[in-house]
């Protein structure tokens, strides 16, 4: 029972982090076609949530929650997709940071913002609507 409560609390925390990050991603997406200086300022505002907290969030899913779910009989194949998306999210985040730091063209930065905000929003939505409820049931 204690283990079940632990996983329920972790899922609650992860869902809450989604609620915190999704509006930030919407704001960033809204700024994608703004002048480059405005877009860079929006990226700077989002950056604190896209590093430490996002890294920790993904580690909690990949190393704690996902293995527990598989051990409880959950579908490892479904988790492979989410894990792959985690890698893609982190790669896009790092590419965006590098593009801003390197002074890349505005179109490249805008494209990376769009890709990152799209995948994060879709990914978190699927976790909230499908994966987390299945995990609550299994764990």
Image: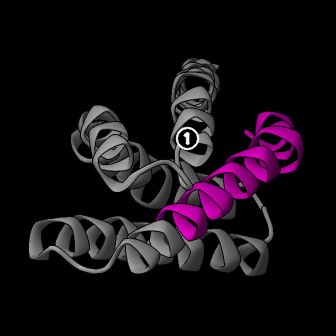
**Quarter assignment of residue 73:** bottom right
Q: Which residue is mark 1?
A: 25
Residue 71 seen by the camera: no
Horizontal arrangement in the rendering, residue 27 relative to residue 44 (left or right): right
Camera-nearest residue between 124 and 5 = 124
Q: How is the image coloured?
A: one colour
Residue found 24% across the figure and 75% down from its top? 99
Residue found 58% across the figure and 70% down from its top? 115
Point out residue 120 in the picture as x, y percentages from the top left corner: 60, 55
Horizontal arrangement in the rendering, residue 37 relative to residue 103 (left or right): right
Residue found 27% across the figure and 70% down from its top? 94
Residue found 41% across the figure and 80% down from its top? 108
Camera-nearest residue between 112 and 72 = 112
Residue 45 seen by the camera: yes
Horizontal arrangement in the rendering, residue 82 relative to residue 93 (left or right): right
Q: Quadrant of the C terminus?
A: top right
The part of the chain drawn in magenta is 113-139
Image height of 101 relative to 8, above or below: below
In the displayed orientation, state which residue is furthest to the left.
Answer: 102
**Quarter assignment of residue 27:** top right
In the displayed orientation, state which residue is furthest to the front.
Answer: 35
- Asked if the stretch drawn in magenta spans residue 3, the answer is no
Camera-nearest residue between 127 and 36 = 36
């Amino acid at each position: 029972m204690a283990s079940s409560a632990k996983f329920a609390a972790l899922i609650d925390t992860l869902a809450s982090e989604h609620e915190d990050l999704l509006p930030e991603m919407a704001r960033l997406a809204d700024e994608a076609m703004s002048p480059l200086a405005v877009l860079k300022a929006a990226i700077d505002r989002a950056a604190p949530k896209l590093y430490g907290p996002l890294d920790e969030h993904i580690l909690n899913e990949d190393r704690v929650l996902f293995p527990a779910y598989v051990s409880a009989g959950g579908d490892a194949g479904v988790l492979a997709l989410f894990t792959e998306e985690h890698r893609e999210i982190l790669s896009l985040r790092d590419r965006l940071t590098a593009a801003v730091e390197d002074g890349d063209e505005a179109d490249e930065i805008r494209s990376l913002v769009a890709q990152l905000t799209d995948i994060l929003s879709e990914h978190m939505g699927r976790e909230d609507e499908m994966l987390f409820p299945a995990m609550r049931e299994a764990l």
